[in-house]
Protein backbone atom coordinates (compact mmCIF):
# COMPACT_ATOMS: atom_id res chain seq x y z
CA UNK A 1 0.00 0.00 0.00
CA UNK A 2 1.44 3.40 -0.97
CA UNK A 3 1.67 6.19 1.54
CA UNK A 4 -0.80 9.09 1.36
CA UNK A 5 0.58 11.95 -0.69
CA UNK A 6 1.03 14.20 2.37
CA UNK A 7 3.40 11.68 3.96
CA UNK A 8 5.85 12.12 1.08
CA UNK A 9 6.35 15.73 2.30
CA UNK A 10 7.68 14.74 5.72
CA UNK A 11 11.39 14.83 4.67
CA UNK A 12 10.81 18.37 3.41
CA UNK A 13 9.23 19.35 6.72
CA UNK A 14 12.11 17.71 8.59
CA UNK A 15 14.56 19.79 6.55
CA UNK A 16 12.56 22.93 7.36
CA UNK A 17 12.64 22.28 11.11
CA UNK A 18 16.32 21.31 11.13
CA UNK A 19 17.27 24.40 9.15
CA UNK A 20 15.27 26.67 11.50
CA UNK A 21 17.04 25.18 14.51
CA UNK A 22 20.57 25.11 13.02
CA UNK A 23 20.46 28.30 10.94
CA UNK A 24 22.79 26.85 8.28
CA UNK A 25 22.49 24.04 5.75
CA UNK A 26 25.70 22.58 7.19
CA UNK A 27 24.20 22.30 10.67
CA UNK A 28 20.87 21.01 9.36
CA UNK A 29 22.60 18.39 7.22
CA UNK A 30 24.65 17.23 10.21
CA UNK A 31 21.51 17.02 12.35
CA UNK A 32 19.62 14.95 9.76
CA UNK A 33 22.54 12.87 8.52
CA UNK A 34 22.09 14.17 4.97
CA UNK A 35 24.16 16.16 2.49
CA UNK A 36 23.85 19.94 2.32
CA UNK A 37 22.50 19.66 -1.22
CA UNK A 38 19.77 17.28 -0.04
CA UNK A 39 18.68 19.77 2.63
CA UNK A 40 18.69 22.66 0.17
CA UNK A 41 16.76 20.61 -2.37
CA UNK A 42 14.11 19.60 0.19
CA UNK A 43 13.53 23.19 1.29
CA UNK A 44 13.41 24.40 -2.32
CA UNK A 45 10.84 21.70 -3.12
CA UNK A 46 8.76 22.79 -0.14
CA UNK A 47 8.89 26.44 -1.22
CA UNK A 48 7.89 25.51 -4.77
CA UNK A 49 5.03 23.33 -3.60
CA UNK A 50 3.64 25.82 -1.05
CA UNK A 51 4.43 29.00 -2.98
CA UNK A 52 6.01 30.47 0.15
CA UNK A 53 9.40 32.11 0.72
CA UNK A 54 10.63 30.31 3.83
CA UNK A 55 14.20 31.61 4.32
CA UNK A 56 16.14 34.78 3.66
CA UNK A 57 19.95 34.87 3.62
CA UNK A 58 21.41 37.14 6.30
CA UNK A 59 25.20 37.40 6.92
CA UNK A 60 25.86 33.82 5.93
CA UNK A 61 22.89 32.43 7.85
CA UNK A 62 19.43 31.52 6.66
CA UNK A 63 16.84 33.53 8.59
CA UNK A 64 13.34 31.99 8.63
CA UNK A 65 10.51 34.21 7.41
CA UNK A 66 7.26 34.64 9.32
CA UNK A 67 5.70 32.16 6.86
CA UNK A 68 8.29 29.58 7.93
CA UNK A 69 7.62 30.25 11.61
CA UNK A 70 3.85 29.86 11.14
CA UNK A 71 4.26 26.69 9.08
CA UNK A 72 6.61 25.21 11.66
CA UNK A 73 4.14 25.88 14.48
CA UNK A 74 1.47 24.01 12.51
CA UNK A 75 3.88 21.08 12.23
CA UNK A 76 4.44 20.74 16.00
CA UNK A 77 1.48 18.39 16.63
CA UNK A 78 2.52 16.18 13.69
CA UNK A 79 6.10 15.69 14.85
CA UNK A 80 5.07 15.24 18.47
CA UNK A 81 2.72 12.47 17.31
CA UNK A 82 5.51 10.90 15.24
CA UNK A 83 7.82 11.06 18.26
CA UNK A 84 5.25 9.14 20.31
CA UNK A 85 4.90 6.51 17.57
CA UNK A 86 8.51 6.07 16.49
CA UNK A 87 10.41 7.38 19.49
CA UNK A 88 12.14 5.37 22.19
CA UNK A 89 10.08 3.74 24.92
CA UNK A 90 11.99 5.77 27.49
CA UNK A 91 11.36 9.54 27.28
CA UNK A 92 14.25 11.62 25.97
CA UNK A 93 15.74 13.92 28.60
CA UNK A 94 14.93 17.43 27.42
CA UNK A 95 16.65 20.54 28.78
CA UNK A 96 15.02 23.92 29.37
CA UNK A 97 17.52 26.78 29.25
CA UNK A 98 15.80 29.36 31.45
CA UNK A 99 16.90 32.87 32.42
CA UNK A 100 15.29 35.42 34.76
CA UNK A 101 16.19 38.42 36.94
CA UNK A 102 16.67 37.83 40.70
CA UNK A 103 13.17 39.01 41.68
CA UNK A 104 11.58 36.20 39.68
CA UNK A 105 14.30 33.58 40.03
CA UNK A 106 14.92 33.33 43.77
CA UNK A 107 11.50 33.96 45.29
CA UNK A 108 9.17 32.55 42.65
CA UNK A 109 10.73 30.31 40.00
CA UNK A 110 12.60 27.96 42.33
CA UNK A 111 9.46 26.30 43.80
CA UNK A 112 7.79 26.35 40.36
CA UNK A 113 10.78 24.58 38.82
CA UNK A 114 10.67 22.00 41.61
CA UNK A 115 6.99 21.19 41.03
CA UNK A 116 7.56 21.13 37.25
CA UNK A 117 10.42 18.64 37.52
CA UNK A 118 8.54 16.51 40.04
CA UNK A 119 5.71 16.22 37.52
CA UNK A 120 8.13 15.67 34.60
CA UNK A 121 11.11 13.67 35.90
CA UNK A 122 12.53 13.21 32.37
CA UNK A 123 13.00 17.00 32.01
CA UNK A 124 16.05 19.01 33.06
CA UNK A 125 16.18 22.75 33.83
CA UNK A 126 19.22 25.01 33.63
CA UNK A 127 18.43 28.33 35.37
CA UNK A 128 20.53 31.47 34.86
CA UNK A 129 19.94 34.48 37.14
CA UNK A 130 20.84 37.75 35.42
CA UNK A 131 19.60 41.22 34.47
CA UNK A 132 16.63 41.99 32.23
CA UNK A 133 18.99 43.21 29.50
CA UNK A 134 20.85 39.91 29.64
CA UNK A 135 17.55 38.03 29.35
CA UNK A 136 16.98 39.67 25.97
CA UNK A 137 20.59 39.20 24.83
CA UNK A 138 20.52 35.55 25.85
CA UNK A 139 17.37 34.85 23.85
CA UNK A 140 18.80 36.68 20.83
CA UNK A 141 22.07 34.71 21.01
CA UNK A 142 20.22 31.37 21.38
CA UNK A 143 21.84 30.76 24.77
CA UNK A 144 18.40 30.39 26.37
CA UNK A 145 15.03 29.02 25.29
CA UNK A 146 12.85 31.05 27.65
CA UNK A 147 13.12 34.15 29.79
CA UNK A 148 10.90 35.78 32.39
CA UNK A 149 11.05 39.56 32.42
CA UNK A 150 9.24 42.46 34.09
CA UNK A 151 9.98 45.18 31.55
CA UNK A 152 8.97 45.44 27.91
CA UNK A 153 12.22 45.67 25.98
CA UNK A 154 11.40 45.97 22.29
CA UNK A 155 14.04 44.15 20.28
CA UNK A 156 13.86 42.56 16.83
CA UNK A 157 14.20 38.82 17.18
CA UNK A 158 12.56 38.59 20.63
CA UNK A 159 8.86 38.00 21.18
CA UNK A 160 7.23 39.12 24.44
CA UNK A 161 4.30 36.96 25.55
CA UNK A 162 2.16 38.59 28.31
CA UNK A 163 1.98 36.47 31.48
CA UNK A 164 0.84 38.57 34.48
CA UNK A 165 -0.40 42.11 35.07
CA UNK A 166 -0.46 44.07 38.33
CA UNK A 167 -1.08 47.55 39.68
CA UNK A 168 1.46 49.17 41.99
CA UNK A 169 1.20 48.64 45.75
CA UNK A 170 2.84 50.17 48.79
CA UNK A 171 4.56 47.45 50.81
CA UNK A 172 5.24 48.08 54.50
CA UNK A 173 5.53 46.35 57.84
CA UNK A 174 2.09 45.45 59.26
CA UNK A 175 2.50 47.98 62.08
CA UNK A 176 3.10 50.93 59.76
CA UNK A 177 0.67 53.89 60.24
CA UNK A 178 -0.61 53.51 56.65
CA UNK A 179 -1.07 49.75 56.84
CA UNK A 180 -4.74 50.11 57.77
CA UNK A 181 -5.61 52.20 54.70
CA UNK A 182 -7.65 50.59 51.95
CA UNK A 183 -5.72 52.59 49.35
CA UNK A 184 -2.79 55.01 49.41
CA UNK A 185 -2.58 58.12 47.24
CA UNK A 186 0.54 60.06 46.20
CA UNK A 187 -0.47 62.81 48.67
CA UNK A 188 -0.43 60.24 51.52
CA UNK A 189 3.31 59.74 50.96
CA UNK A 190 4.20 63.29 52.00
CA UNK A 191 6.67 63.07 54.89
CA UNK A 192 6.64 59.27 54.91
CA UNK A 193 9.88 57.32 55.18
CA UNK A 194 10.48 55.43 51.93
CA UNK A 195 12.77 52.88 50.35
CA UNK A 196 12.91 53.78 46.66
CA UNK A 197 14.06 52.02 43.52
CA UNK A 198 16.96 53.68 41.73
CA UNK A 199 16.32 56.14 38.92
CA UNK A 200 17.25 53.58 36.25
CA UNK A 201 13.79 52.11 36.81
CA UNK A 202 11.11 53.73 34.63
CA UNK A 203 8.57 53.48 37.47
CA UNK A 204 10.79 55.68 39.69
CA UNK A 205 10.51 58.52 37.17
CA UNK A 206 6.76 57.99 36.98
CA UNK A 207 6.48 58.06 40.79
CA UNK A 208 8.56 61.24 41.06
CA UNK A 209 6.22 62.95 38.60
CA UNK A 210 3.13 61.88 40.56
CA UNK A 211 4.65 63.08 43.83
CA UNK A 212 5.52 66.43 42.27
CA UNK A 213 1.96 66.85 41.00
CA UNK A 214 0.58 65.99 44.47
CA UNK A 215 3.14 68.31 46.16
CA UNK A 216 4.23 65.38 48.30
CA UNK A 217 7.80 64.96 49.53
CA UNK A 218 8.58 61.60 51.16
CA UNK A 219 11.78 61.04 53.11
CA UNK A 220 13.80 58.57 51.02
CA UNK A 221 16.21 56.75 53.35
CA UNK A 222 17.59 54.23 50.85
CA UNK A 223 17.67 53.47 47.14
CA UNK A 224 17.95 49.92 45.82
CA UNK A 225 18.17 48.33 42.41
CA UNK A 226 15.78 45.41 42.91
CA UNK A 227 12.24 44.99 44.15
CA UNK A 228 13.43 42.14 46.38
CA UNK A 229 15.79 44.48 48.26
CA UNK A 230 13.07 47.14 48.59
CA UNK A 231 10.65 44.63 50.09
CA UNK A 232 13.28 43.18 52.43
CA UNK A 233 14.14 46.64 53.77
CA UNK A 234 10.44 47.38 54.25
CA UNK A 235 10.19 44.18 56.31
CA UNK A 236 12.95 45.60 58.54
CA UNK A 237 10.77 48.62 59.27
CA UNK A 238 12.79 51.18 57.29
CA UNK A 239 9.65 52.55 55.66
CA UNK A 240 7.35 51.72 52.82
CA UNK A 241 8.27 50.79 49.26
CA UNK A 242 6.29 51.26 46.07
CA UNK A 243 6.65 47.98 44.15
CA UNK A 244 5.22 45.53 41.69
CA UNK A 245 3.42 43.01 43.93
CA UNK A 246 4.21 40.11 41.60
CA UNK A 247 5.70 37.77 42.60
CA UNK A 248 6.73 39.09 46.05
CA UNK A 249 3.20 38.99 47.44
CA UNK A 250 3.45 35.19 47.37
CA UNK A 251 6.60 35.26 49.51
CA UNK A 252 5.74 38.06 51.95
CA UNK A 253 2.12 37.23 52.79
CA UNK A 254 2.74 37.34 56.57
CA UNK A 255 5.47 39.92 57.13
CA UNK A 256 4.33 42.75 54.82
CA UNK A 257 1.14 44.68 54.30
CA UNK A 258 0.35 45.37 50.62
CA UNK A 259 -1.88 48.40 50.09
CA UNK A 260 -3.07 49.36 46.57
CA UNK A 261 -1.54 52.61 45.29
CA UNK A 262 -4.19 54.88 43.79
CA UNK A 263 -2.24 56.01 40.74
CA UNK A 264 -1.82 54.83 37.12
CA UNK A 265 1.31 52.73 37.64
CA UNK A 266 0.87 49.31 36.07
CA UNK A 267 3.27 46.42 35.68
CA UNK A 268 3.43 43.63 33.13
CA UNK A 269 5.38 40.38 33.33
CA UNK A 270 6.32 38.64 30.10
CA UNK A 271 7.71 35.40 28.79
CA UNK A 272 10.56 36.23 26.41
CA UNK A 273 11.12 33.82 23.52
CA UNK A 274 12.76 33.96 20.11
CA UNK A 275 10.60 34.91 17.16
CA UNK A 276 13.19 33.39 14.81
CA UNK A 277 13.23 29.84 16.18
CA UNK A 278 10.43 27.48 17.17
CA UNK A 279 9.80 27.26 20.90
CA UNK A 280 11.03 23.92 22.27
CA UNK A 281 8.33 21.63 23.58
CA UNK A 282 9.76 21.86 27.10
CA UNK A 283 9.54 25.70 27.00
CA UNK A 284 5.87 25.51 26.01
CA UNK A 285 5.28 22.96 28.77
CA UNK A 286 6.92 25.19 31.40
CA UNK A 287 4.93 28.27 30.34
CA UNK A 288 1.75 26.21 30.58
CA UNK A 289 2.83 24.94 34.02
CA UNK A 290 3.36 28.51 35.29
CA UNK A 291 0.02 29.71 33.93
CA UNK A 292 -1.77 26.81 35.62
CA UNK A 293 0.07 26.88 38.95
CA UNK A 294 0.66 30.56 39.71
CA UNK A 295 -1.14 31.13 43.03
CA UNK A 296 -4.06 33.55 43.02
CA UNK A 297 -3.73 36.84 44.92
CA UNK A 298 -5.79 40.05 45.16
CA UNK A 299 -3.23 42.25 43.36
CA UNK A 300 -2.27 40.45 40.15
CA UNK A 301 -4.07 38.76 37.28
CA UNK A 302 -3.29 36.53 34.32
CA UNK A 303 -2.56 38.51 31.18
Image (cartoon, grey):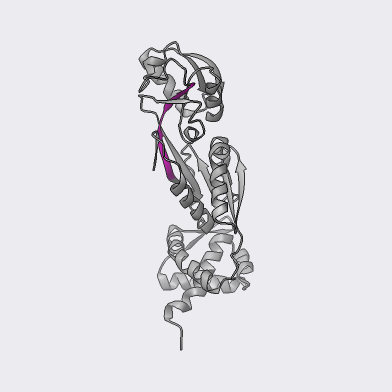
The C terminus appears in which quarter of the rendering?
top left
Which residue is depicted at the point 48% across and 45% down? Answer: 271
- Of residue 61 and residue 252, the one placed in the foreground of this image is 252
Q: Write the residue at 53% across / 45% down.
A: 112
Residue farthest front in this picture = 254
Q: Does residue 204 sit above or below 32 in this rendering?
A: above
7 sits to left or right of 98: left
Which residue shows up at 62% across the image and 73% down it?
35
The magenta segment? 162-173
Compared with residue 190, is residue 300 higher up or lower down, i.e. above or below? below
Q: Position of residue 80 (x, y in %)?
A: 49, 66
Compared to 170, does 76 lie above or below? below
Residue 149, x across and y down, in percent: 50, 40
| Residue 131 sits inside the magenta stretch | no
Along the line of sight, which residue is nearer the eye, 146 or 170? 170
| Up-down relation of residue 189 to residue 149 (above or below) | above
Q: How many marks?
A: 0
Most foreground residue, 228 or 73:
228
Query: Is 163 within the magenta?
Result: yes
The residue sitting at the top extreme is: 191
Tell me the chief SS of the magenta region: strand
Q: Nearer the viewer, residue 193 or 210?
A: 193
Amino acid sequence: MSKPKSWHSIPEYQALRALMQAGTTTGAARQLGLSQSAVSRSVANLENRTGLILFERDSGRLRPTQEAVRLNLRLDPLFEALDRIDGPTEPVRETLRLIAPPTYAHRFLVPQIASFLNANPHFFVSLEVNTSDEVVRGILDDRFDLGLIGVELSRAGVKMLPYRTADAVCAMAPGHPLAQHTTITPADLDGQTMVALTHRHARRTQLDRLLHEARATPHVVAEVSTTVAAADLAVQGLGLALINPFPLVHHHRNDLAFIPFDAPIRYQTYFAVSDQRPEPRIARAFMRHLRLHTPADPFTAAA
